[in-house]
Amino acid sequence: MMEKKNRSLTRFEEDLARARAAIQKAVLSKNYSSDKEVTFIPKGCIYRNQYAFHQSHREMVKRFKIWTYREGVQPIFHEGPVNNIYAIEGQFIDEMDFIGKSPFMAKHPDEAHALLQLTMSRLWQTDIRTGIEVVVLTISWFLVMTGYLGIEKGSNAKWDIPVKVAASVSYASPELCKNFIRVLCNTNTSEGFRPGKDVSLPEVYLPFGKLGPPRLGQPPNNRPIIAFFAGGAHDIIRKILFEHWKEKDNEVLIYGRLPIGKNYTKLMGQSKFCPCPSGYEVASPRVMEAIHAGCVPVMISDNYSLSFNDVLDWSQFSVQIPVPKIPEIKNILEGKSRDKYLKMQERVVRVQRHFVLNRPTSPFDIIHMILHSVWLRRLNFELPVPH
C-alpha cells in the first residue's frame, strides 16, 4: 500500500514539474501557447506577469484535480450560504461538491493533487439527523496537500478537523495544520494569515437568487461623486472615517445608515472612487461591489492581504490610503489627474471578469481564480516521497 502511494506521489510531482517548466518557458519566451482556441488571453499591466498567469491557468485546467471529502462526523457539514454576505463560500462549496460535474474533481483521493476538507457553515445549525443544535464554523474551508496525512500518520488520510475558528486552527494544531493551504475570508496578517501559503478569499455579497449585484455603473464622464461609502461603524477605522467625513462634504459622501430614498448601488455607479474601510474584519464585500460598479476601490485597512495578489497588480486599479491619512482623503483623490483616473477606471472594468461568479464556473472567473490561488501554492510546494 505504501509503495503504491509513493508511486502516486512521484507521478504527481513529475506532473507538477512539467507544469512549472511550461510556465517558466512562457515567461522566458514571452509567448502565449494553447492546445485549443481560447476566447480570452490576459494582457496588460493589471497582471504581474501576463505570460506566467496565462500558462499557469492553462496548466491548472489541464492537470489540477481535487478530492472533496464527504460529510464527516458531527458537526462537519458540506453546505454554506449561497446568498448575502458569505455567499461565495456556499457557492464555492456547491460548485466543488456537485459530484461528477466539476472538471477539477478527482474520482478517487489517490488521483488528487489536493484534498479538500470543508469545515464551515452557519454559526448555529440543527443537525436534522439527530435534532441536536451544534456550533458550525463560519468562514473557511481547508485544503491539505495530497499525501501528507497518509504518509505521516500511516493511514488513508481519512480524518476530521476539530471544530475551531478557522484562522486559529493552526495555533491549536500546528503540526497538523502546517501542511494546510487555508482558504479564508479573514486575511489579516496580524492574526495568522500567511500570504504565501494561505489563500485570500474575496467576500461577495449576493442578492437572493442572483449571481451578482445589478450593473448600474456609469461611464467615467457621468460620475460626479468623488467618493461614496455607506456602512456601519464596525471598527476603529470606520469610526475615524466617520469622525472626519460623515455627512460633512457634498462630493465625498460618507454615511452610516444610508438616507431614505438613496440607492446604494446607484450611488456606487455614480462615484469615481469607493472607500473600502475595514469592518468586523480587514476584508469586506465592499471591494467586490466597487469593482462590479466600475468604481476605483480605495483600500483603507491594516494588514489586509488582497485576493489574487499573486496574479493581479492591485496598484494599477485601486488606491491605498493609510489610516493616518484618512483626514486627507479628498485631497489625495482630487490629486489624481484626469488621465490617471481614466486609466485606473478602465483597468477596474477589465479586471471585473476575474470577480464574476458563473455557475457552472468558467475560465478566469472568480471560482477559477480561487482555484488558481490554491494551484499556485500547490505548485510552489514539493511533497517529499519517503524511501
Image: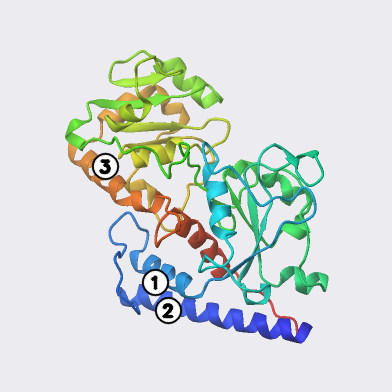
State the mark number for residue 55: 1
Percent position of residue 314, x then y: 38, 48
- Image quarter (top left, top right, bottom left or bottom right) of the C terminus: bottom right
Amino acid beneath label 2? Ala
Residue 303 visible in the picture: yes
Where residue 332 sits, quadrant-wise, is top left
Percent position of residue 370, x then y: 50, 56
**In the rendered image, which residue does mark 3 sit on?**
345
The residue under the point 62% across, 44% down is 139
In the figure, 85 relative to 353: above or below?
A: above
The residue under the point 36% across, 24% down is 328
Compute the Cα span from label 1 to label 3. 27 Å
Compute the Cα span from label 1 to label 2. 7 Å
Q: Are the residues tagged 2 and 3 within 8 Å (C-beta)? A: no
In the figure, 339 relative to 254: above or below?
A: below
Callout 1 secondary element: helix
N-terminal label among 1 and 3: 1
